Amino acid sequence: MTEEPKAAQPENDDITVILNRIAGRSQKLVQDFIKRQNMLEQRQAGVDPIRLGSAMMELGTRLWANPAEVMNAQFSLWQDYLRLWNSTTSRMLGGEPEAVVVPDRGDRRFKDTAWEENPVFDFIKQSYLLTSRFLLKTVGETEGLDEKTQAKLAFYTRQFVDALAPSNFVATNPQVLRETLETKGENLIKGLANMLEDLERGKGKLTIRMTDLDAFEIGRNIATSKGKVVYQNDLMQLIQYDPTTEKQYRRPLLIVPPWINKFYILDLQAKNSFIKYCTDQGFTTFVVSWVNPDAKLAHKSFEDYMQEGILAALDAIERAIGEKAINAIGYCLGGTLMASTLSYMATKKDNRIKAVTFFTTLVDFSEPGELAVFIDEEQLKSLEMQMARTGYLEGAEMAHTFNMLRANDLIWSFVVNNYLLGKEPFPFDLLYWNSDSTRMPAAMHSFYLRKFYHENKLVEPNGMSLCGVPIDLGRLRLPVYWISTREDHIAPWKSTYVATQIYKGPKRFVLAGSGHIAGIVNPPGSGKYGYWVNDELPPDPEAWLAAAQHHQGSWWEDWSAWNAAKSGAMVPARVPGAGGLPAIEDAPGSYVRARSDEAPSS
């Protein structure tokens, strides 16, 4: 029989002493926390913003309409439980039976060896996996539900299943039990203090720290590329970066990030900075740094982001270095804005952007992945009511939504580490950026969610207008480079691929490994992921991938060669502030430093 770890079987007296000690020492922490809290705004009673109640009622109705299928599913689950019981009994008697069910590859919740070596914890683990599989399969295979209702039920069922994982509880997590005994409960006391600090920082809402928030300072050890802010308005600052080569390509590069997050995801540290990489390749690099808006900018619209963002940046670049023609990059929502602006410019006979790159960008929102769960008429109305009170959507709301797409990695792993193990989160630049959220102006965000996600008007020729100009993406005839990522939960690569069938100019589609962020921030030399290329662009993305060639290394080098070929001759390097626009302040500027509880000046 396998020897069980001592920490997994604590004496009852030990547990009693530890719990009494925790209760006594934590009482004052809780009392202090309550004294410091202000009264929170109460939610309206009876509001069901995600309409989960009605969806659950519909699920129940469909299940009752198919009792035979329900019985078959329950019988199958019961058979699995019997197999598990027999397997566990055999193991307790010295046998070595095969597992009835195993975690998915990469499921880090059960990486502790006790989940395999200890029969009790192995039984708990397999019981959980069988039950969660049963629940998810029942919801996913229920007939008669409309597609959106089924997707919503499946998503929230997975959230429920993830929350109830045995790894999330003290008594059923072997690592936490060991830590509790070894530290005599100090881990749980520290964990409670961590939780109270997170609640206080979130003003009553649990805002989990994913990294050491004191380990990084913008401009000191993150967002450190040298440059100058050379232009600003209400919505953005335009940064021109210092050259790192003696000569640069004549045609400058404008990078437009999403305003849902801050631009320095592309300038975390020197070793993984895409911005530094661009200057090292000889590109005169400009980056839009969006404002973190407050209620004064509630009226700013999607059209304003086009006019005061991309179009204003084009004018400023011409004044700064005398070049009218540029190449451009749009990242995620910044890419959606870029595509919309390019259609507007095409109608206006404005051809200043000569080549464009899209990072993980959707223009067809018919299949936007699990984000669609959050967008229907009822939820949009609820969100608009919320924004009407404040003038904006708080960035933490969007951040939480994105975190829910990968709840085990971005929520529950930190619950275990911070609250159950009582440890401090590891300093990690990417997670610091992820915690540095921004607001969205009410008018712009409502338009974006309705016209793009809900109504899918951007992909419809002349389906929407900007500043009185009908938008038709079929007018785009300039060279286009796409980089999408294979595991993207925010902009699914197959949905981004749709644009290859819309634009009329020369096209190159590249698929990188990993997800929305890690697949983009993947510098040469990292040795991670690789990328796929196929010069043919058939309508079916799966057919494209089947014939694509995989390359080791970073897609950055492939893109750099593509962009260099469209950037003209070499000229003496340009110094920010030395041309037609004087420097306003050093990069990364003041707008990016404004946290969500501050209002930047402009």
Image (cartoon, rainbow, N blue to C red):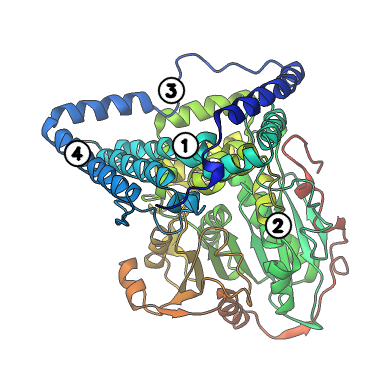
Along the horizontal axis of the image, is 471 left or right of 528?
left
**For the residue labelled by badge 2, is the local secondary structure a helix, a strand or a loop?**
helix
Between 10 and 59, the one nearer to me in the picture: 10
**Mark 3 and 1 residues: CB-CB less than 8 Å, in contact?**
no
Q: Find residue 519 and report its horizontal and vertical position in percent.
A: 54, 64
For badge 3, the amino acid type reads Asp
Eye-nearest disc, 4 or 3: 4
Seen in the picture, residue 580 relative to 177 is either above or below; the reply is: below
Eye-nearest disc, 4 or 2: 4
Which of disc 1 and disc 3 is earlier in sequence?
3
Count neighbours of disc 2 (C-alpha within 10 A) and say few if under 14, some if 14 to 19, many if 20 or more.
many
Name the residue located 69 percent from the left edge and 15 percent from the top edge: 39
Which of disc 2 and disc 3 is earlier in sequence?
3
Residue 14 in sight in this render: yes
**Mark 1 and 4 residues: CB-CB less than 8 Å, in contact?**
no
Q: How far apart are the two marked residues, 3 and 1, measured between alpha carbons?
A: 20 Å
Seen in the picture, residue 81 relative to 192 is either above or below; the reply is: below
Q: How far apart are the two marked residues, 3 and 2, measured between alpha carbons?
A: 36 Å
Q: Which residue is mark 1?
A: 163
**For the residue labelled by badge 1, is the local secondary structure a helix, a strand or a loop?**
helix
For badge 2, the amino acid type reads Tyr
**For the residue labelled by badge 4, is the local secondary structure a helix, a strand or a loop?**
helix
Q: Which residue is mark 3?
A: 48
Q: Please, which residue is most extreme toward the left here?
A: 68
For badge 1, the amino acid type reads Ala
Residue 399 in sight in this render: no
Report the disc number at residue 73: 4
Name the residue located 56 percent from the left edge and 53 percent from the top edge: 337
Q: Which residue is mark 2?
A: 264
Count neighbours of disc 3 (C-alpha within 10 A) and say few if under 14, some if 14 to 19, many if 20 or more.
few
Between 80 and 317, the one nearer to me in the picture: 80
